[in-house]
Amino acid sequence: MLEEFNKLPESRAAEALRACCASPVWVRRVLAARPYRDLRALQTASADALKSLDWTQLRQALDAHPRIGQRATGETQEARWSRGEQAAAKTVEADVQRQLVEGNQRYEARFGHVFLICATGKSAGEILSALRHRLGNEPYAEREVVKAELAGIVRLRLNKMVG
């Protein structure tokens, strides 16, 4: 699949990358380094591109993510992946769902952006616990957590894209 990605026309490759990370700067940087010899090289280029983004550029990626527990709409690859990644957060009791909604609201009021977590493999309880814990972070510390969570999401999505 990586060979196919390397051979895609630039516009289609950019579209595939946007499903992994919505930052236009990240897409351009990862696209510019094609062709990739293996998945590790692609992951390294992705990580380097993510590290180089400033907060405004990272916000573009964050803004593309739905709230935890909120169903991503549409039939784009990103929306399908998001629905799968958040599956545990959608199949919870009404009380836990309510706590996630309230936690999201408090988080957004505190930090000014969506609560981002690499939800794959996490239960709704684990997500809620992380949300509550992160509400106590200082804004600069939370930005570092957000960068790490985004990197995890992007890494998983790149694996899906070429796997």
Image (spheres, rainbow, N blue to C red):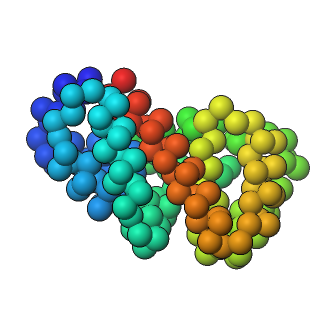
Which picture quadrant has residue 101?
bottom right
Q: Position of residue 159 (x, y in %)?
A: 41, 30
Q: Position of residue 112 (x, y in %)?
A: 61, 75
Which picture quadrant has residue 141?
bottom right
Q: Quadrant of the N terminus?
A: top left
Q: Position of residue 161 (x, y in %)?
A: 35, 32
Q: Position of residue 50 (x, y in %)?
A: 40, 55
Q: Is residue 115 visible?
A: yes
Q: In the image, what residue occupies the spot 66% across and 73% down?
A: 139
Nearer to us in this view, 76 or 27: 27
Q: Is residue 19 visible?
A: no
Q: In the image, what residue occupies the spot 49% across and 48% down?
A: 151
How many numbered dots are placed on residues in this image?
A: 0
Q: In the image, what residue occupies the spot 74% across and 66% down?
A: 137
142 relative to 161, above or below: below
Nearer to us in this view, 48 or 94: 48
Q: In the image, what residue occupies the spot 21% across and 28% down?
A: 37
Left or right placement of residue 4 versus residue 146 in this view: left
**Extreme-right residue of the structure:** 95
